Amino acid sequence: MSLTVEKLLNLKHSKNRGSAPRFTYLGAGAKNKCMDLWLKVLGDIDSYVDVTAGSNNQPYMIGKSKNVPIRVNDASYYSYCIGLGLFTRQTETDIQEFAQLLVDAIESPEDGVFSQYEKMNTTVANYIDGVIALINERFSSGDAGFLKACVGHAIMGRYSMRALTFFYKRDVGVVLPDGTPPTILDFAVTAYRAARRKNSCFYPNGDAFYTHAKTFIETVNLEGATVNFDPAWPFAKKGMVNPYKFYIQVGSILRRQPLPTFPFWVSEKSEAVADEFTTWVALCLQKGAREVYAWNQTTNFPTYDDLVNRLEKDFQVSNALSVQQESTGHKYDFTDYVLKIEGK
């Protein structure tokens, strides 16, 4: 295999489209379509806290647009790496050094979490583990977070999640039926392209956290903050595996450690989720948050009625935003909606 620094540096440049970093994350595309409307809904704010930040596209664009302090959190280490890259870097990362690292990792494979996944080719898995190990060794926190986010983005682009395991998606990462070995070259190119394209995306007036939502709320200062939630709501359709678990898996690979034990919800029944979420909102307002917003969609639990009815017992609730969306594959329509929640 002929992977060289020169080959990576001479790749045709593809600039980042638009003003957002666009890291791969479920639901980010639909929310990005609402961005102009969302900025108008927010109006003037003093600070913005996203408790379940996901791709971090929205917090980043809010920071750039409104020039306010940003704090983000997520139980996925992949999301945390994105947050580090967007909010703790002060300058662009040395991309030439990253190109050298991608080449050096060929001679420095590591045995890690990725190689334990079903149907994952060990050679490619150990190469990716080696890349992550060298990132940790050669780069400081913000730069390391950014580059691991780019590696995670490449993993998301090359593998799909079915029943919590990695399956063949394109031409990298598994042994094909005819025994053809996978190539590392394609993965390295994908990660490098992501890093070069997203390198100019940072807003150095924020901080990133990695923990369960309730723990984050309990430990940070929320006085006067606008707080946003778009958590991993359970799917309302029975028998569907929550795809957000895929991001937890990717995070475990980037950490090179087994899956963390963050439970999404105590119970995934509609009314139970509404009850648990209400306790998060109550704690935010008790700690001085100016307002709380909750994103959800009509394909999820809790149902709109269950969520609104539960919240209205304790708070003032209003509809802040509602946008009709179309599912991937155009199989069904659904509604994204945002609730504004304030104390009575």
Image: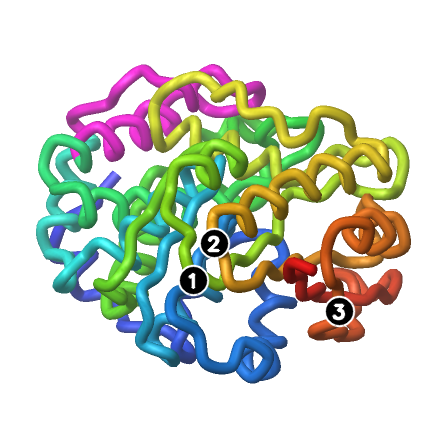
Please, what secondary structure does the residue beneath circle 3 have? strand
Query: What x and y, as percent, mark residue 265?
Result: 68, 30
- Type of amino acid at the residue the image marks with label 2: Gly
Quote the CA–CA distance across marks 2 and 3: 19 Å
Looking at the rendered image, the quarter that the N terminus falls into is top left
Question: How is the protein colored in the picture?
Answer: rainbow
In this rendered view, identify the residue nearer to me: 217 or 163.
Answer: 217
Q: Residue at x 71, y 35 (%)?
A: 276
Quote the CA–CA distance across marks 1 and 3: 19 Å
Tell me the residue that label 3 is attached to. Answer: 318
Tell me the residue that label 1 is attached to. Answer: 224
Query: What x and y, as percent, mark residue 75?
Result: 49, 35
Callout 3 crowding tier (Cα within 10 Å): few <14, some 14–19, many ≥20? some
Q: Are marks 2 and 1 in contact (CB under 8 Å)?
A: yes
Q: Confirm whether the magenta stretch covers residue 256.
A: no
Looking at the image, is 234 positioned above or below residue 206? above
In the picture, measured across the screen, residue 103 lies left or right of residue 187, that is: left
Tell me the residue that label 2 is attached to. Answer: 288
Bounds of the magenta span? 107-134
Callout 2 crowding tier (Cα within 10 Å): few <14, some 14–19, many ≥20? some
Q: Confirm whether the magenta stretch covers residue 131.
A: yes
